[in-house]
Image (spheres, helix red, strand yellow):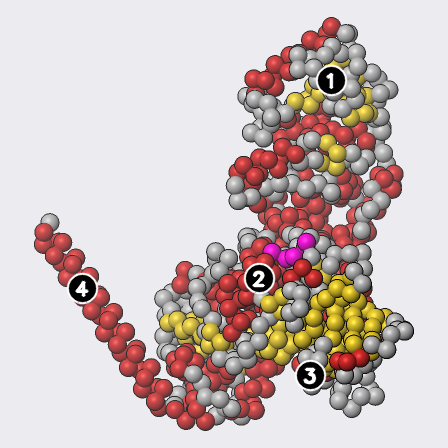
């Protein structure tokens, strides 16, 4: 026994010694290679590579993982890695570089050609690479379905099923009955007590628009509605005696045409009530006994249903049976009548949801016949939507097969299957695989990548990514493959790139604080190498009914301010959560156009041909956060960063509940939204302006508020009398004066459209303000004149003209 322990200790020491020796060898190798390629790393670009970038380029393990924060030069490192490998004797054709988007692939090809004159390396998106494999191995020609065709195919199936399929109509009918249902999940609450409190007050809307207290009561009310049975909800039973607690008795449902009452009892088969009920199980059952006695005493008819009937999916059948016993004939509304009653159905939104369901299922390789086992009947809206979506999914798959077409998801999984069947064939083609934006890979992408490293493969992997910028879960991306890289591959040589060359330190400090709130991440501290000493500004606009007008003018005035400071239009980027953040974006674009300021947006550009300085490529950028990824600007304006709104940030995760059964990557929605906000703020290379609404500030803004400087506002309570202060303003109204002592008086308007009286004495010897011009006014004084607070100009006041409206 002692000998075995000694041997074990010896072997452990031996392994540690071996590991230490290997580590020393790796360090020595890195030092030698960095010294050998000094000229490459220092003299090929405008700036030399920093130490960590050089280490990343030369590391030579089987798996090399580069954790590259925003603005740390990941594309540069990828390009240098390719150049380095070729210098080391690797043939360009033996290098495969995979990018996430066509734009990234094109950018890499241009950089390789312009910087190193390299053109033979295979640089592809994952889809184009997969497609090349499928084409090479297919016995017959397959064409790729156009994204627009997918929408048309789903719409065609939807219309066909709606007109002719009783099965589809049945599922669709029940889905619409529950389309406004909102379900509370205990996992959405930090404390169980919060969940129970929410359930205690939760209401459910029926097809008639009433509010009832439980999902089962809603199901009963909707049943009565669908079968044209008139009822009243919680009608006072004035015939009943007063209970011991003097509370009037209100049975759940009263069928007015039949003088029949129905009580739905919220108990399970053990006669237990849910935790959130105010009454205990014993008290609840005692109340039931009292009610039963009242019906018997007053010779009234009582029907009872139970929550376990609903939970077990038998409620509708039991209702039909009970009503039939009392001679109640059931006549169901026809489908057209039902659709008229549920007149808020948006077919376009619904078709989009069906399309997302199908795409998500295919992204996660979920087949039609696997969907049923992923569903739960307890969530009716989700269940019946998925049942109808599965029929459209099968229709779509049949169309592809009949027409010999494949979509982007088919490309990925067909290629993965081919690689699995003969991985050696493709392993022999390449010595090195480089993958960009590894934080955005999906299950299918991983299936392809892993095949290059099966068995005795000699291929080496070099992957670059930043889990803090993983924002594409709606396309199947999952940061876990990057965060837990070694779980899916093997031990890797890690390099952290944290020297940011884009953002000011204030922005990066805000970003670090923001991401600290996420639990699932790779820890790192991003540092600034940008000398700009700006502080992000927080602009809080009032929540009045003029908010749309105010945010439009405020945003355009910020653009004009930057242009007046000799920035080019291309140096300004406006970012919002969605590119369709109407009505704000539309109004802003219209005002920019009216003022002759060029802009580019998603399929909506305007160029001022009369201005020589505003070439087509020289325009203000207006993007959603997703569209802004990979871009930057000196001056970034984040628009409408609010909490509660149709365009809020974070968004309400409405879609995921319908898509959830086939969304196998269970991404934390709030954490991804926070990463998206991080991407937004790190687009700024100089100035960052965040616009929000008073009493409706985004929680993400609150998380970084200590790193922001509030923009000047006309808060008179914070201005000390007779103490100088600054203000950006323009003339709102001028008054004629009968006094020789007054040079100019009237009202000023601030950027937040607040107004205040102002007065300039003749003795101040200042130039007069002109209308339609914005000024920076320094060393103003707040005083009282004729009983009113107003701004007064003094001899020390400075007037700086900014720009003309």
Q: Nearer the viewer, mark 3 or mark 4?
A: 3
- Of the numbered discs 4 and 1, the one sitting upstream in the chain is 4
- Of the numbered discs 4 and 2, the one sitting upstream in the chain is 4
Q: Which mark is residue 13?
A: 4
Residue 399 position in % (x across, y down):
72, 59
Q: Is residue 773 left or right of residue 369?
A: right
Q: CA distance from mark 4 to mark 1?
A: 80 Å
Q: CA distance from mark 3 to mark 2?
A: 26 Å
User: Residue 698 lies in magenta, yes or no?
Assistant: yes
Say whether residue 752 is visible.
Answer: no
Q: Are marks 2 and 1 in contact (CB under 8 Å)?
A: no
- Give the magenta part as a residue range: 695-699
Vertical relation: 577 (above or below) 741 = above
- Which residue, given by chain and number where applicable, does mark 2 sit on? 705
- Which residue, given by chain and number where applicable, does mark 3 sit on? 565
> SS for tag 3?
loop
Q: CA distance from mark 3 to mark 4?
A: 66 Å
- Which residue, given by chain and number where applicable, does mark 1 sit on? 248
């Amino acid at each position: 026994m002692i000998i075995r322990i000694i041997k074990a200790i010896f072997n452990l020491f031996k392994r540690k010694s071996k590991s230490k020796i290997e580590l020393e060898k790796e360090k020595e190798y890195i030092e030698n290679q960095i010294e050998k390629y000094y000229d490459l790393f220092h003299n090929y670009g405008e700036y030399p590579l920093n130490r960590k970038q050089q280490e990343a380029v030369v590391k030579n393990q089987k798996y090399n993982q580069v954790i590259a924060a925003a603005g740390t030069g990941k594309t540069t490192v990828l390009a240098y890695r390719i150049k380095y490998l070729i210098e080391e004797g690797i043939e360009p054709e033996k290098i495969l570089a995979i990018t996430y988007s066509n734009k990234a692939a094109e950018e890499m090809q241009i950089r390789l050609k312009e910087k190193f004159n390299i053109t033979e390396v295979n640089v592809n998106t994952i889809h184009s690479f997969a497609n090349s494999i499928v084409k090479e191995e297919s016995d017959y020609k397959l064409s790729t379905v156009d994204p627009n065709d997918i929408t048309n195919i789903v719409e065609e199936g939807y219309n066909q099923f709606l007109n002719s399929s009783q099965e589809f109509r049945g599922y669709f009918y029940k889905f619409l009955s529950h389309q406004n249902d909102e379900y509370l999940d205990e996992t959405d609450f930090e404390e169980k007590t919060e969940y129970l409190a929410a359930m205690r007050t939760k209401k459910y809307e029926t097809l008639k628009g009433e509010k009832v207290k439980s999902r089962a009561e809603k199901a009963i009310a909707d049943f009565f509605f669908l079968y044209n049975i008139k009822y009243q909800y919680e009608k006072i039973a004035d015939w009943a005696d007063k209970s011991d607690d003097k509370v009037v008795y209100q049975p759940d449902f009263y069928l007015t045409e039949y003088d029949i009452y129905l009580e739905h009892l919220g108990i399970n088969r053990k006669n237990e009530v849910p935790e959130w009920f105010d009454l205990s199980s014993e008290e609840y059952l005692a109340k039931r006994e009292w009610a039963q006695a009242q019906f018997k005493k007053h010779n009234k008819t009582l029907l009872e249903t139970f929550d376990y009937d609903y939970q077990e999916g038998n409620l509708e059948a039991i209702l039909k049976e009970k009503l039939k016993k009392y001679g109640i004939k059931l006549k169901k509304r026809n489908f057209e009548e039902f659709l008229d009653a549920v007149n808020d159905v948006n077919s376009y939104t619904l078709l989009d949801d069906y399309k997302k369901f199908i795409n998500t299922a295919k992204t996660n390789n979920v087949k039609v016949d696997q969907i049923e086992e992923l569903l739960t009947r307890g969530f009716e809206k989700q269940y019946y939507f998925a049942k109808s979506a599965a029929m459209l999914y099968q229709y779509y798959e049949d169309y592809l097969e009949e027409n010999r077409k494949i979509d982007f998801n088919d490309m990925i999984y067909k290629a993965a299957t081919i690689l699995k069947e003969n991985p050696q064939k493709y392993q022999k083609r390449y010595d090195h695989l480089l993958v960009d934006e590894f934080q955005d890979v999906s299950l299918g992408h991983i299936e392809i990548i892993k095949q290059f490293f099966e068995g005795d493969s000699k291929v080496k992997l070099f992957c670059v990514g930043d889990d803090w910028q993983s924002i594409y879960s709606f396309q199947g991306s999952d940061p876990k493959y990057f965060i837990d890289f070694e779980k899916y591959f093997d031990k890797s040589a890690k390099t952290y790139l944290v020297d940011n060359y884009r953002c000011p330190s204030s922005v990066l400090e805000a970003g670090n604080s923001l991401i600290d709130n996420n639990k699932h991440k790779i820890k790192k501290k991003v540092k600034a190498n940008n000398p700009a000493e700006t502080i992000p500004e927080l602009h809080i606009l009032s929540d009045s009914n003029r908010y749309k007008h105010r945010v439009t003018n405020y945003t355009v005035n910020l653009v004009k301010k930057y242009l007046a400071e000799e920035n080019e239009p291309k140096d300004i980027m406006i970012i919002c959560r969605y590119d369709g953040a109407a009505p704000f974006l539309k109004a802003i674009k219209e005002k920019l156009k009216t003022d002759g300021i060029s802009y580019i947006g998603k399929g909506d550009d305007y160029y001022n041909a009369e201005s020589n300085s505003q070439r087509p490529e020289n325009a203000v950028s207006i993007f959603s956060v997703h569209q802004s990824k990979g871009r930057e600007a000196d001056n970034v304006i984040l628009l409408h960063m609010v909490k509660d709104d149709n365009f809020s940030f974070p968004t309400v995760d409405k879609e995921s509940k319908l898509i959830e059964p086939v969304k196998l990557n269970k991404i934390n929605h709030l954490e991804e939204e926070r990463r998206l906000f991080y991407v937004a703020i790190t687009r700024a290379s100089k100035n960052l302006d965040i616009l929000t609404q008073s009493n409706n500030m985004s929680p993400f803004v609150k998380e970084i508020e200590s790193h922001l400087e509030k923009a000047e506002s006309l808060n008179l309570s914070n201005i000390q009398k007779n103490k100088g202060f600054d203000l950006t303003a323009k003339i709102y109204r001028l008054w004629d004066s009968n006094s020789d002592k007054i040079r100019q008086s009237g009202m000023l308007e601030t950027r937040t459209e607040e107004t205040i009286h102002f007065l300039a004495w003749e003795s101040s010897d200042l130039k007069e303000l002109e209308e339609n011009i914005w000024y920076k006014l320094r060393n103003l004084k707040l005083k009282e004149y004729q009983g009113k607070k107003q701004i007064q100009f003094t001899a020390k006041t400075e007037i700086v003209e900014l720009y003309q409206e």
